Amino acid sequence: MAKKSKSITSKKTAGKPTVRSVSRTTTVKRKSVKSSLPPKISYREGVPGKDFQLTRLDKQYKGLSIYKIEFDLPDDNHCVNYVDSANNTIVFQDINGEYVLFNLDGTPVSETTKSLCLQKLAGKQRTLSKNRPKNESVARGIVLLQDCAPAIDLSGARSVLAKLNAELEEKCGASRPLFMKFAPFHEFDEDVTRFNEYSNLSIAGQFYNTLILALCTSDGKCVSTIEFLLSHSGEIAILSKTVQAEEGKRYNKMLRYVLTMIAMQLPGIHSIKSIAVNPISAWLLIHYFHARVDAGNPFEIFLKDKGIAMENITQPVIQAYYAEKKGPVHLTIDVNDANSQDSYTQFHKLVAGVSPADEIKC
């Protein structure tokens, strides 16, 4: 601290009043300056077979090689991740929180790449823990893996799907053969319509990790899809899309019933998260799938303000909410026997061949 001081003086002059000048001692506080130095980054170059398992798959996507990467996360979960060769350098944190760098093509990571990577990581270090972790490109050619799909057995779900496909074939086989497929995205040979696609990293960095439930045609096109983002916590986040020319045929509605059934066969899964961006989707999920509104969502507050209980929600209520532009409705569907059985009943109505006006259009 620095001090400034002035004296108090008085001066007397004949015939003039005394003039007194006063000054006070003031204290000036200097602002402390926080260090802007980036946090120290602990890292090493990874060794395949020791720090991670790397497998190159037999197929490509748009001319890019696809790799399966497995490693253990700091939270003790085992991570299964898929990336493509668009980015050669991969970075992740091992079980001890240390960053591991390696190149997909097996070459050593150059000093230039290491320097660039550490610089970018240092800049992100303060914000990484504040947001939901996701895989992202931190610099040209460098991908940071922070989130990944758990290893999961699909055999039970595929067994259920085979039986449902038999009913679908009975409904549409003669007019337009349709079939449902459930697989990781990288296993699809068909042309797949997805909710969104920005780059090889795509939605939340889960481009290849996502599981997709798709309705496909015999000519190799999947016209309606539900995309799964799995988490280690047992939740499924879903995104759905139908080709515009195929809308109104109840395809997505059917897939949602199927989703509720096959989710019962996915080990460790207990709930499905969905974001309804329009009143039709919200009504469909609440009325037909017994979805509940997530706590704290503006729609929950809207209902409380109006004095409306969940069991009394109607289409006009939902339409009024969206008319006020309060944002999408966040919903949760519980994965349980009751919802699964109810979904099968509704699925059967869509393909039974009894009431064409209420069924899917092949």
Image (cartoon, rainbow, N blue to C red):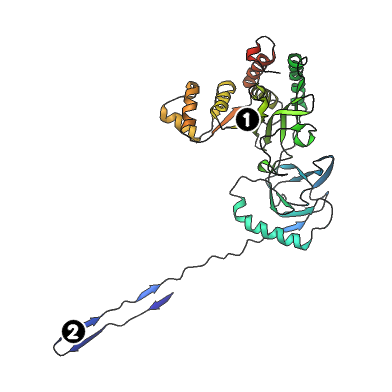
Q: Is residue 273 left or right of residue 7?
A: right
Quadrant housing residue 220:
top right
* Residue 92 visible in the displayed image: no
Answer with mark 1 or mark 2, whichever residue precedes in sequence. 2
Q: Is residue 226 left or right of residue 71?
A: left
Q: Nearer the viewer, residue 302 or 332?
A: 302
Label of residue 18 in the image = 2
Q: Name the spot of residue 54 as percent of width and height, x first.
A: 82, 46
User: How far apart are the alpha carbons under marks 1 and 2?
Assistant: 86 Å
| As drawn, 255 above or below 139 | above
Q: Name the spot of residue 97 as percent of width and height, x first.
A: 69, 52
Residue at image location 47% in from the left, 23% down from the top:
316
| As drawn, 181 above or below 123 | above
Residue at image location 66% in from the left, 12% down from the top:
356
Extreme residue in the right direction:
58
Q: Where's the C terminus, which quadrant? A: top right
Label of residue 271 in the image = 1
Q: Name the spot of residue 157 as percent of width and height, x first.
A: 74, 26
How packed mark 2 is, by other alpha carbons closer than 10 Å (few <14, some 14-19, many 20 or more), is few
Label of residue 326 in the image = none
Q: Name the spot of residue 292 as percent of width and height, x first.
A: 54, 28
Q: Nearer the viewer, residue 221 or 253?
A: 221
Quadrant housing residue 199:
top right
Extreme residue in the top direction:
354
